[in-house]
Image (tube, rainbow, N blue to C red):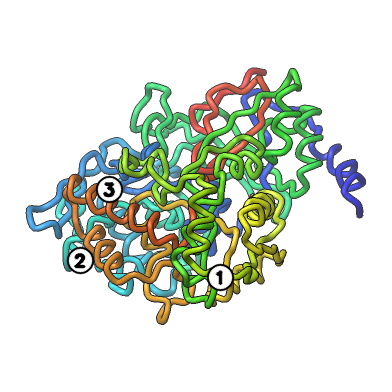
Amino acid sequence: MNRLLASACLLPLLAGPVLAQSLTVAVQADVRSINPGVNRDDGTDDFALQMVEGLVGYDEGGTPQPLLAEKVALSADGKTYTFTLRKGVKFHNGAELSSADVLWSWNRYMDAKTEWRCTSDFDGRSGLKVESVEAPDAQTIVMKLDKPNALFLDSLARTDCAMTAILHKDSVKPDGTFDKPIGTGPYKFGEWKRSEYFTMTAFEGYASPKTDGKADGYVGSKRPLLKEVKFLVVKDPATVKAGLTSGALDLSEILPSDVAEIRKLPTLEVVTAATAVRQVLLIQTRDAVMGNQKLRQAIAAALDMDEVVAAASDNLGQTNTSPIHPGSSYFGAVEKQGHKFDPARAKKLLAEAGYKGEKVVILANKRPRVPSFPAAVVVQSMLQAAGINADIEVLDWATQLDRYNKGNYQMQSFSFSARFDPALAFEQFAGPKDKQPRKVWDNPQAQEKIERLMSLSDRAERQKLVDELHKAVIDEVPLIFMFNGVDAIAHSKRITGFKPWQSKLRMWEVTAAK
């Protein structure tokens, strides 16, 4: 079935009557499961985190803040965390939250049979080990670590861990199999028709952390002001655009290339926001050609990054050559200083590198919502202008990812998923290549600093390490950060209060006129 025919067949399904205070939202793919943190992907997390919550959650800047906890106290030795629960919080079945629910949820997650995404992040296999969890009274949870770890709260808040959500035990059937999420979030699970749609309805008993109407990551004001939200699986961008234009769809992510056109439509509004996703050029430092640091520095100097970003993001992105995203509290004056476009320096460095015209191949893919290929095209042109024999090899995403994991490439136009804490942002690409071929930056001194960053809690000391690591990445050029991802969301003008954040379609504090 061709794309236009598919659109024509789907639009009658989309065009049913719209209930007051109900919205239809298009999503690219079905959820993988409704079991938080188990068999998940980013879209699955998005849906789950409208319905469940954890002790802590990310604020707008990606810093963990109390959520189901009212406050968090840390012992002097940095190993014991005491969480005091908020009072009056209820589950979707009406039961009141207590420390017993936290303890039950934790034990379930740490049971291998649950197959939770993040078990290995807390059992010591990844360096962080929770030695004990106790509930001394109904409002208190005490979690003890084997040693201080500055990333503990960040790990609890991670969206791919489903925020270490606290569930009611009735989420699980008597035989131990998962039934449905009974959480404390602003919306309750509705229904799921595989490959077609999934829904959620307002939880009238929801206790919002704040009620000032100001969304703040996964904390802040989270009132469910819509009766129901239906997430409709629509994979084709042309069908999405047609549904938005006709009014059959109320809200959807759109392609950056469609932003200018849709902004001209009188019934629609387009909102954009930067994310912590990083668009990068990976460089294999063990390659016979790319192992030359002066050549890598020449490549960085040959790139007019503002032009690269404008072309690759349809003028929506902003240049950022730091591993730290601009929304982070660690993004300071040092992080703003990165690679600079300097053609004369590029030529000088090429001469010093002894470059003799060896071919440099850039791997890319043509996924429609990822700027891998358009970025590679502009980079290739600029490198060729500087005298570098650059070529592009287009691969399907699975093959490119396999080449990345094996370290089998010279350069790649690639995307790194969001990491909020700077220690995780650096750890994502730094490490020993002999043990982990996918790692890009193999620098033992840098690794030592990253490990210190993971254990330190002193803010000033952490900033000092972040600054040093940033400068080292810019100098050694094991990879080149270009810009952060951009969310582009189109929605009906009858909708108010929607604010994109980190590619999550948060539907709290959102209203819709009839």
For badge 1, the amino acid type reads Tyr
Q: Residue at x 63, y 41 (%)?
A: 313
Question: Which label belongs to residue 98?
Answer: 3
Q: Image check: 397 left or right of 105?
A: right
Q: Is 492 or 210 nearer to us in this picture?
A: 492
For badge 3, the amino acid type reads Ser
Q: Within 10 angstroms of label 1, few (less than 14), some, or many (20 or more) residues?
A: many
Q: Within 10 angstroms of label 3, few (less than 14), some, or many (20 or more) residues?
A: many
- Residue 96 appearing in the image: no
Mark 2 and mark 1: Cα distance apart in space: 37 Å
Q: Residue at x 66, y 33 (%)?
A: 251
- Label 3: state its secondary structure: loop
Tell me which label, 2 or 3, sits earlier in the chain.
3
For badge 2, the amino acid type reads Ser
Q: Which quarter of the figure has residue 94? A: top left
- Label 2: state its secondary structure: strand
Q: Are marks 3 and 1 in contact (CB under 8 Å)?
A: no
- Label 1: state its secondary structure: helix
Please name the residue that numbered disc 2 is placed on: 132
Mark 3 and mark 1: Cα distance apart in space: 45 Å
Residue 19 locus on image (x, y percent): 69, 27
Q: Are marks 2 and 1 in contact (CB under 8 Å)?
A: no
Tell us which disc is closer to us: 2 or 3: 2
Residue 306 locus on image (x, y percent): 56, 39
Q: Image check: 178 left or right of 495?
A: left
Please name the residue that numbered disc 1 is placed on: 404
Image quarter in which the N terminus is found:
bottom right
Residue 149 position (above or below residue 275)? below
Q: Which quarter of the figure has residue 367? A: bottom right
